[in-house]
Image: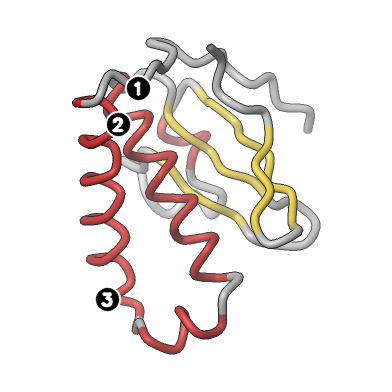
Amino acid sequence: MNYPASIHIKGYEYKVEFVRTTQEVDWELKATDCLAQVNSRADDRSFRILASQSPFGVLDCLIHEILHAIIFRNRALKSLLNENAEETFVDTIACELANLLISNNFELPSIPEITERIK
């Protein structure tokens, strides 16, 4: 099994990129300890995930960022959650889903392939 190269959310395609360093994760270069980020800009919809994490960490981060994208694309969900509430909600649900999948023997690759970025 491989991680997907892209994921569709409400009709929008998001690339899934696995990178080597935390600096490659952060689009705005504000943080040095980012493990994952989602970008929903029309010109570059994508997820960036630090590949060197544990299999649980990669899965948790991917689910976490997918949930952010779902909320971004859903006005009803967005209206229910302020920024702090969204992060707490997403963090909790992502961790619970990752635990559920792993504890029920969901098959996942142990090491994602690094995405070669074209600049």
Give x and y (percent) for residue 40. Answer: 64, 60
Three-letter amino acid code of the residue under disc 1? Phe
C-alpha gap between disc 2 and disc 1? 5 Å
Label 1 with label 3: CB-CB less than 8 Å: no
Q: Which residue is mark 2?
A: 101
State the residue at coordinates (49%, 39%): 25
Mark sitting earlier along the chain (1/3)? 3
Residue 98, picture quadrant:
top left
Dot label at residue 84:
3
The residue at which mark 1 appears reads as: 106
Give the CA distance from mark 1 to mark 3.
30 Å
Q: Could you tell me which secondary element the residue under label 1 belongs to?
A: loop
**x then y, percent, for residue 44:** 74, 51
Mark nearest the camera among 1 and 3 is: 1
Q: Nearer the viewer, residue 7 or 35?
A: 7
Q: Amino acid at mark 3?
A: Asn
Mark 2 and 1 residues: CB-CB less than 8 Å, in contact?
A: yes
Q: Secondary structure at mark 2?
A: helix
Q: Earlier in the sequence, mark 3 or mark 2?
A: 3
